[in-house]
Image (tube, rainbow, N blue to C red):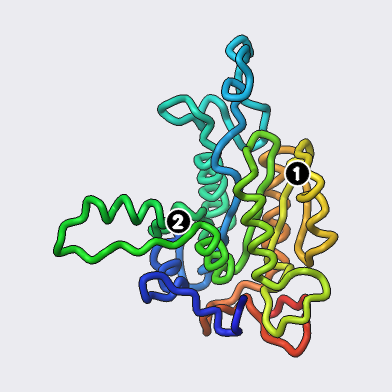
Amino acid sequence: MFDGETNFQYNERPISDILAEQAPAPPKFSTHNDFTVYVMGPYTAFNAEVAYDDADTLRTPFQNDPLFDPDKHITNDSKGDMEQALRDFCTNLRENLNCRAFIATDIDIPTHEQAEKQNEIRSDDEPAVEGMDPLAQSVAFAAHSDAVIFLFTRGGLTTGVSAETGGILGECHLRRGNPALTHKPGQRVGLYLDESFSSATIDELPKGYDIQYDSFSTKSDLHEKVRNWFDSLDRQTRDRDLPAFIPGETYSSETDS
């Protein structure tokens, strides 16, 4: 849980410093638009050919989805690449909303499994590579970002991101009535659901957690709603590590930095 300092580190370096170096910048970057946005969503698209033996008779094994393009977001082995769809979404945010939108894999921090593989091939004079589990990375990225976006659409496999969503919201002390002394303002955490997406757990997160919630029907609809949300947030040049966090005596939903 947060201790008020939010001093998340990797390899003895503050996560805030790593994000400042590695989070992709907008085309016209300056200290005035150093607004970091962590985007989370499924990295893999549902593929009917994996689930059904006769799916090869379908026109496409992928579901119709507002973000995923089956003609574009495909890996070399013909798997649905939702990760690339998220990257394209972030690129659009950077270019049109002038922010530093990124996904977890944009940041060069290996998982424990990846670190183990790297250590197997490193030379004896190279230092051992440290790993950091995906949820710990996501909590740290969310803590040190000015805004966090969770995306759920009909075409993605959401098991992993669903688990991380709950973990992050809990670590941020965003459950309604949480008396924690520090928290991330719920106005800086946005949950966006494709209108055709259905999950009882995800649908009801706003009932239990103090976060922003909206639905969308198309990619352009999503971008417009995100633009309106960003316009309501106060963007200021950082003068401390984490202006998006507010210490207080009791739980609060204020957003001022």
Q: Looking at the picture, how far across and down is residue 67, in whole percent?
A: 62, 37
Do residues under tags 2 and 1 come within 8 Å of each other at their CB atoms? Answer: no
Instruction: Name which residue type carries label 1.
Output: Phe
Residue 237 higher or lower than 129, as above or below:
below
Q: Is residue 111 left or right of residue 143?
A: left
Q: Is residue 59 visible?
A: no
Q: Quick one: quadrant of the C terminus?
A: bottom right
- Judged from this view, the residue extending furthest toward the right is 207
Q: Residue furthest top?
A: 57
Q: Quadrant of the N terminus?
A: bottom right
Whole-angstrom CA distance, mark 2 to mark 1, is 27 Å
Q: Which mark is residue 27?
A: 2
Residue 127 horizontal side relative to residue 50, left or right? left
**For marks 2 and 1 on the same chain, the one whose residue lies earlier in the sequence:** 2
Residue lying at 76% horizontally and 61% vertically, measured from the top left? 212
Q: Of helix, strand and loop, which one carries label 1? A: strand
Q: Check the image and report above or below for 35 versus 51.
A: below
Residue at image x 74%, y 46%? 193
Residue at horizontal 78 percent and vertical 85 percent from the top: 250
Q: Position of residue 91 (x, y in %)?
A: 51, 48
Check residue 40 in the rendering and tell me which mark sits there, or answer none: none
Q: Quadrant of residue 188?
A: bottom right
Q: Nearer the viewer, residue 93 or 72?
A: 72
Residue 10 at what x, y percent from top left?
41, 70
- Whether residue 77 sits left or right of residue 140 in the image: it is left
Residue beneath label 1, please? Answer: 216
Q: Between residues 227 and 127, which one lies in front from this camera angle?
A: 127
Query: What is the secondary structure assignment of the residue under circle 2?
Result: loop
Taking 231 as reference, is 4 above or below it? below
179 versus 102 height, above or below: below
Q: Residue at x 65, y 34 (%)?
A: 155
